[in-house]
Image: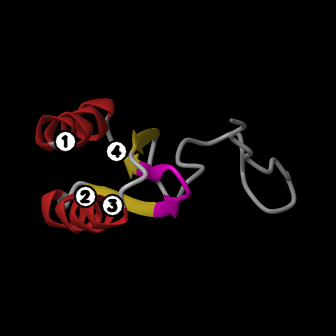
């Protein structure tokens, strides 16, 4: 799996923190399942558990769910992932 981030100095100020709209931390979590109904339940659970301190988006993949999270602290991202993993 590759994680691609476009680095174009004409678009962003890379010499300051907050490359992602002033968020300083990002995380990626992949939850494996091929069960379509389980994916739907997990996506709803991910939405329900999202704290206000982070921004998150998930993509339904062929064999699971990919969740990308932006936060202003590593602990906020980690705690969100930990809450999700406890449920699956």
Distance, label 2 to label 1, CA atoms, is 8 Å
| Label 4 SS | loop
Of 48 and 20, nearer the camera is: 48
Q: Is residue 2 magenta?
A: no
Quadrant for residue 30, please give it.
Answer: top left
Distance, label 3 to label 1, CA atoms, is 11 Å
Q: Would residue 41 appear left or right of 25 to someone viewing this image?
A: left
The location of residue 27, given as percent across then percent down, is 44, 39
Q: Is residue 61 magenta?
A: yes
Q: Would residue 32 appear left or right of 49 to someone viewing this image?
A: right
User: What residue sits right under mark 3 in the picture?
Assistant: 39
Residue at 47%, 54% in the rendered image: 22
Q: Are marks 2 and 1 in contact (CB under 8 Å)?
A: yes
How many other residues sit within 10 Å of disc 4, few (<14), some (14-19) or many (≥20)?
some
The location of residue 40, given as percent across then percent down, is 29, 68
Distance, label 3 to label 4, CA atoms, is 28 Å
Residue at 33%, 31% in the rendered image: 74
| Label 1 SS | loop
The location of residue 82, given as percent across then percent down, is 19, 33
Here the colouring is secondary structure
* Vertical order, 58 against 86 (above or below): below
Distance, label 4 to label 1, CA atoms, is 25 Å
User: What residue sits right under mark 2 in the picture?
Assistant: 42
User: What residue sits right under mark 4 in the picture?
Assistant: 72
The mark nearer the N terminus, 3 or 4, is: 3
User: Which span of residues is magenta-colored?
Assistant: 59-69
């Amino acid at each position: 799996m590759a994680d691609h981030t476009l680095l174009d100095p004409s678009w962003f100020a890379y010499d300051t923190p907050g490359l992602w709209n002033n968020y300083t931390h990002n995380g990626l979590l992949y939850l494996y399942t091929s069960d379509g109904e389980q994916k739907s339940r997990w996506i709803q659970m991910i939405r329900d558990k999202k704290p206000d301190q982070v921004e998150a988006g998930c993509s339904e993949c062929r064999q699971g769910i990919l969740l990308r999270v932006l936060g202003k602290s590593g602990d906020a991202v980690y705690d969100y992932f930990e809450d999700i993993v406890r449920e699956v």
